[in-house]
Every structure is written in structure tokens, then in C-alpha cells.
Image (cartoon, helix red, strand yellow):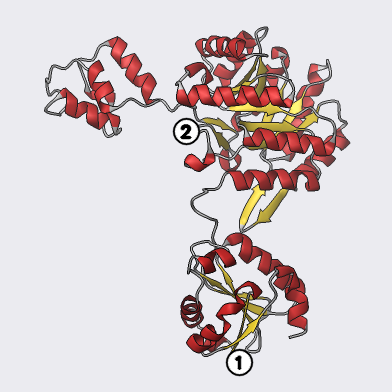
Amino acid sequence: MALSGLDIYKLLPKTNCRKCGFPTCLAFAMQLAKKAVELTKCLEITKEAKVLLESSAQPPIKLVTVGAGENKLEIGNENVLFRHEEKFFRPAGIGIILEDSLSDAELSNRISQINKLHFERIGQNISVNLIAIKQVSADKAKFINAVKKVSELTKLGLVLYSSDAESIRPAAQLTANRKPLVYAADKNNYKELAKIAKEFSLPLAIKEENLEKLSELSGAVSSEGASELLLDTSDKPINEKIWDLTQIRRLALKKNFRPFGYPAISVVKNKDNYEQIIEAGIYVLKYSAIVLLEGFAPEEILPLLTLRQNIYTDPQKPLQVEPKAYPIGQVSVNSPVLITTNFSLTYYTVLSELEASKIPSYLVSVDTEGMSVLTAWAAEKFTPEKISESINKFEIPQKVNHKQIIIPGYVAVMSGDLEEKSGFKVVVGPKEAAGIPSFLRNL
């Protein structure tokens, strides 16, 4: 937890020497608390105080990077327990596990399918982030071959999933420029894996069965020089895992407990296709920064990516599209004009139904500050005045040769007032977007 200006002042020499450029040590402390100056400006600070102040200046959960280039995954640096307190900033990474026992053909086929796991939802692209190559064979060469194959066929981030240092070293050397995550060090191999992680500047996951042992391992691995860590409390029932993940997050944020000041990782081993997605979703919610699982069917992965997208948005700022008149299809002067709000989910739901109708139309997105139809209407953000203003602003009278607009059925009550304000005939459309295609065909 960051120190206040007065807390910092207590650790300063209090000589008011002015060598830092400030008239008093208190003034310097206040600027230091705001991160407006560097601690190095104080030339008389003791070594003990310097260590304490540098430690307090670190984020409670360290920022860790897996991968490189445009596909790098940044995790950590979160500062709240609950999303409504502020927001969660760095979306959890989703990774698919592939075993090195797969044949080259099977490996190639699965990688091809995983590479296609990207979707567009409410104007955003969502996709998986990582492929984990798991060593299940005793043949080191087979593992290295699988790592090489995966690295050649995908641009996604990589996870080297093995506890054998002799297998990890050549794999790390082969893929060091991709900055793969090494998973995982335990009490038996941490010195060897920490040495590899330090040598190649790689992130390293550490694994222990309980929190006390995990905190001890975290300190031991850090002392070996590995600086980017992820924490795993091993395989256990979901309720116990959630408890561990919550305590790690709570101790890092509320107690500034440095051994737990790293993001967490979870591996889903449930073999049921749907139960593993449910379990993975729980870990995304509480509080895994990376979740690895075996399932990769689109109908399984899309719900997980959708959940992640929803959780890592700002709860105080709804997703919005730009307010404007959108031409859908090959519009003409005879195309119908539909009115909606600029809430992303509403807009894209209406858009998909308009595209399905195959009737070229104009879709006018009114600026409602990201509120849905009924919410915006109740908040007086979706009013006859606002709609009339949008119609003129987006030049609807110049785009079509008719004087007719279609409004959502839920706000039919505004029809008369809107006709008077806009000069357009108002047609009340369906309440639900799913009714748009048949409504337009019968218009």
C-alpha cells in the first residue's frame, strides 16, 4: 500500500538541507507521495529508509509480460478487490493446452483451429492469448519438436509447460525472443528453473499446495534472481482454489504482502468440455490473471471470452459506439431509417438483425451516453428533442426522399411528441430486435 506524505516524511532525514531542490523535507515528501519527484533526489536518506520507500513505491501486484510484439500479454498491476470499486484493468489471458504426445498432423490441425479462435463482439475483437505446450512424454526431443512446431505455426504467446529443467532450457533458448512463460517451478526444481528464467529474462510460474509454502517459495525464487513470477496453488477443489486466489489478492492489496505481489495462474484439468469452461470462468472472476485449459471448440471458448470481456470493462462507463447515421447494406433514398441508442450491445444487436433482413437501411445511433433504450428514455437521454437533433445533425433529410422514421417499440409513448418535433412520420417498430426482419419485410 502506498505511503502518505507524512509517512514518507517520517523516514526522511528531516534536515531541510534543500539539496533535493525543495525548501523542506516535508515539501519533498509530499511531492514524493504524488510521484512528482524521484527518491534519488534525497542525498542524505539512510539505506534502511531507502529500502522501505522503494518497496512502498512498487505496485501491490507486479506487472508481468508474457509474449512479445503485438501479441504480448500484460497482466498484474491490479489495485482493487472488487470491480465496482474502480475497474479491472488487464484482461486475464486464456491459454489452450496441447500435449507433446500429439502427432505432427494432429498438432498442426489443432493449432490451425486455435488460431481461428477470434471473434468480434460489440465492436471489439476478442481471442485466446496463449498456447501451452505440455510435456507428457519422457522424450525431451519430442517436447522440443512440439515447441518448435507450435512456435512456427502461431503468433500467440507460448507457455513451456514442463517441470523438467533439462527440457525447459533448450525450449527456452529456442523461443526466448517470444518471451514464453515457464510453467512451473516447485520446491524440487525452483533453483534450476529460476536460473533459466533469469538467464533468458522469462516469466516463471511457481506452484505449491498451500499459501504458506507458496509464500516461502516466492521468496526463494526471487532471491535466485527471477523477477517476473506467477502464483499457482496447485490442483484442488474449486471452492478451495477460489479461497486461495482470493487470499492471495487480498494479502497483496490490503496487507502489501510482497511474496504474493504477483498475478495468479490456474490450470483447469476437468475433462468435461462444459464443466471446464464453467471452472475457467470462475477463475477469471476470482482472480486468475492466466487460465489454461484443454478445450478449444468455438462454442466453448466464445462464452469464456465474452465473460472476460464483460468483467474487464469499466462498470461506470458503458461500451459505446460513435453516434452517427450508419448505412447498412447498399442504401438508397428509399431506405428505411431506424433509430436506436449508442449503447454498444443495443447497437450491435440491432445491426445483426438488420443485416439478417437483407433490407438496406439507415441506423441512426443517438448519443445516450452509452445507455440502452429504456434506461436512456428513463434518464431523459433518449428524448424527442435528442432524436430530432440527431436526425438533422446526421443529415437524414438529405439522405432519403421520404419522411418516415422507425423507433423501438418500448418507447412508443414518445411517437406524437417526436412527430411534432422532427417533422417525420413516426412508425413504432418491434420491442425486441429479433422482430426487425419480419417487421421490415411487412412495412
Q: Label 2 is placed on what type of residue? A: Asn
| Quadrant the C terminus occupies | bottom right
* Label annotation for residue 402: 1
Residue 342: give x, y in percent of width and height. 55, 66
Residue 320: give x, y in percent of width and height. 54, 60
Q: Nearer the viewer, residue 95 or 131?
A: 95
Residue 363: give x, y in percent of width and height. 61, 75
Q: Is residue 60 left or right of residue 362?
A: left
| Above or below, 71 relative to 20 | below
Q: Residue at x 80, y 20 (%)?
A: 141
Cα separation between marks 1 and 2: 54 Å
* Label annotation for residue 326: none
Residue 287: give x, y in percent of width and height. 60, 31
Q: Nearer the viewer, residue 137 or 183?
A: 183
> Could you classify mark 1 by the number of other residues whose Cα lies within 10 Å: few (under 14), some (14-19), or many (20 or more)?
some
- Please indicate, yes or no, whether residue 201 appears anywhere in the rendered image: no
| Above or below, 100 relative to 426 | above
Q: Earlier in the sequence, mark 1 or mark 2?
A: 2
Q: Residue at x 67, y 55 (%)?
A: 120
| Quadrant the N terminus occupies | top left
Q: Is residue 315 left or right of residue 121?
A: left
> Label 2 near label 1: C-beta < 8 Å?
no
Question: Which residue does the numbered mark 2 point to in the structure image?
Answer: 79
> Could you classify mark 2 by the number of other residues whose Cα lies within 10 Å: few (under 14), some (14-19), or many (20 or more)?
many
**Residue 352: quarter of image:** bottom right
Q: Nearer the viewer, residue 176 or 195?
A: 195
**Residue 31: quarter of image:** top left
**Residue 308: quarter of image:** top right
Q: Label 1 is placed on what type of residue? A: His
| Above or below, 410 relative to 119 | below
Secondary structure category for the residue under label 2: loop
